[in-house]
Image (tube, rainbow, N blue to C red):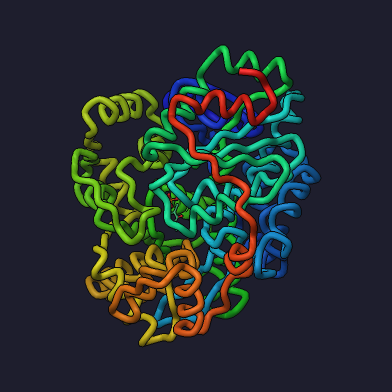
Amino acid sequence: MYYKSTRDKSLNVTSAQAIAQGISADGGLFIPSEIPQISMEELRALADMRYDERANVVFGKFLTDFTPEEIAYCTSNAYNTKNFETENIAELTGAFGDAQILELWHGPTCAFKDMALQILPYLLTTSLKKNGEDKKVVILVATSGDTGKAALEGFKDVPGTEIMVFYPDHGVSSMQKRQMATQEGGNVAVCALEGNFDDCQNGVKKIFTDAAVKEKLAAAGRMFSSANSINWGRLAPQIVYYVSAYAEMAKRGDIAFGDTINVVVPTGNFGNILAAYYAKNMGVPIGKLICASNVNKVLTDFINTGVYDRNRDFYATCSPSMDILISSNLERLLFLLTDGDDAQIRDWFGKLSKDGRYEVTGDVLAKLQSDFVGGFCDDADTKKTIRDFKEKYGYTCDTHTAVAVKVYLDYLGQTGDTTRTLIASTASPYKFSASVLEAIEGTQSGADEYAQVAHLAEVSGLPVPASLAALKDKPVRFSEVIAKEDMESYVLKSMGIDG
Ligand SMILES: *Cc1c(COP(=O)(O)O)cnc(C)c1O
């Protein structure tokens, strides 16, 4: 197996090259040349394995240039109880009606991004070694909240790496700020920026592509790399939990091996749901893939009409990690649905960057709709769903998961499709305590974040994740706020290189 680019199918690189490079030089995304298959017999065998062993099986099919020892080194360092609060790594709930919830937030930052960012540093450093690269890698991240913390926790004290995260000083929640400002590790730096998220992102991009900075880094034995969500090293780990969840459901008798399940995913950048599509095409019996959006419903409209149009108002919602108008990973799906028509992809994504809009052909729309259903939910319904679901089942979900639950219930009402359904839960309710409490109690509380966490513990009966509880007593290590113009000198200074 090799990897090609969605914008140049003649490209031919190994998975180690794809992971080290992150994005293809032509602007396309790396994509495996074929989708490997998993048999029902293999799925049965997974049932008796630990999560990291299941991951070895799935990675073995995609990262064919890695040795089994290299893969096991990565999975065992990532998926263990030092990093996750549960031995199962991803936790499957019992049934709520015809649905079960897959909790993907038992990692160190309480959001599903840990599932990929706990292993990415190992995949990346192993890839660099395989490529004969002996420089230390420097990861630069611009974040609006969740990704930065998950990347910091993933790369913290990983040998051969350094990580620097920039966030907008007034653009993240107080819990998110505290999570980053107290970050531990000898190879980390965190810096707030006077500006918004776009300023952070532009600044990082500029430093990445600055030849003079690159030279200074090389002279100091270092090179830049990326932990961006379009890196194949972030997508592959997400396929694992869908394959694993199917085996787990069958093992527990929730379904029989061979039964079809539907999957619902609260979606932003389309990475998580694309991983479920890969699992389906590997042979995991998955029927419908239900793509749930908040009011930034560009994907719902796309699935229903075939028109992708980002020219619309942007809304800040109570499910902020899904406030996205450009879903990058959709490019990989369209490459697959057009049977690898790279010219067509270049045309559509050229139009997207020029006009903010493209429309797919009728046959592609038909294929899209045979696998995907799109739905959306506004903030009022998100909060009502949190309250109703808790009342009916005693289960407290976060705002992102609630969007998925509501879209699933709408789908169920419209179709009567009682296929057993897996709902991906992407964040702990504690990560969004204020909104979750407001949903349950009907009023906004002015209390500070820890009072709210304590109150949510009473109301929900859920244990407070140790990593969030511990933040309260951790000293602030990073309080620097800089101007956009000073990002480059900050980066160089952090590495001990003279500007
Ligand atoms: C990132 C994120 C999402 C969106 O996932 P995508 O893979 O970008 O679609 C949903 N929920 C939470 C809590 C997230 O952090």
**Total labels drawn:** 0
- The image shows residue 39 at horizontal and vertical percentages of 61, 57
Q: Which quadrant is home to the C terminus? A: top right
For this view, does 277 lie left or right of residue 233?
A: left
On screen, residue 425 above or below 485: below
- The structure residue drawn at horizontal position 75% and vertical position 52%, both measured from the top left corner, is 77
**Can residue 261 be seen in this snapshot?**
no
For this view, does 477 lie left or right of residue 286?
A: right
On screen, residue 288 above or below 208: below
- The image shows residue 152 at horizontal and vertical percentages of 61, 46
**Can residue 495 be seen in this snapshot?**
yes
Residue sitting nearer the eye, 273 or 106? 106
Q: Which quadrant is home to the N terminus? A: top right
- The image shows residue 141 at horizontal and vertical percentages of 53, 37
For this view, does 194 lie left or right of residue 475?
A: left
- The structure residue drawn at horizontal position 60% and vertical position 53%, both measured from the top left corner, is 476
Q: On the rendering, which quadrant does ligand 1 occupy?
A: bottom left
Q: Quadrant of residue 405?
A: bottom left
Residue sitting nearer the eye, 491 or 430? 491
- The structure residue drawn at horizontal position 36% and vertical position 65%, both measured from the top left corner, is 404
For this view, does 16 lie left or right of residue 210?
A: right
- The image shows residue 97 at horizontal and vertical percentages of 39, 82
- The structure residue drawn at horizontal position 60% and vertical position 62%, both measured from the top left corner, is 471
Residue sitting nearer the eye, 93 or 213? 213
Q: Quadrant of residue 491?
A: top right
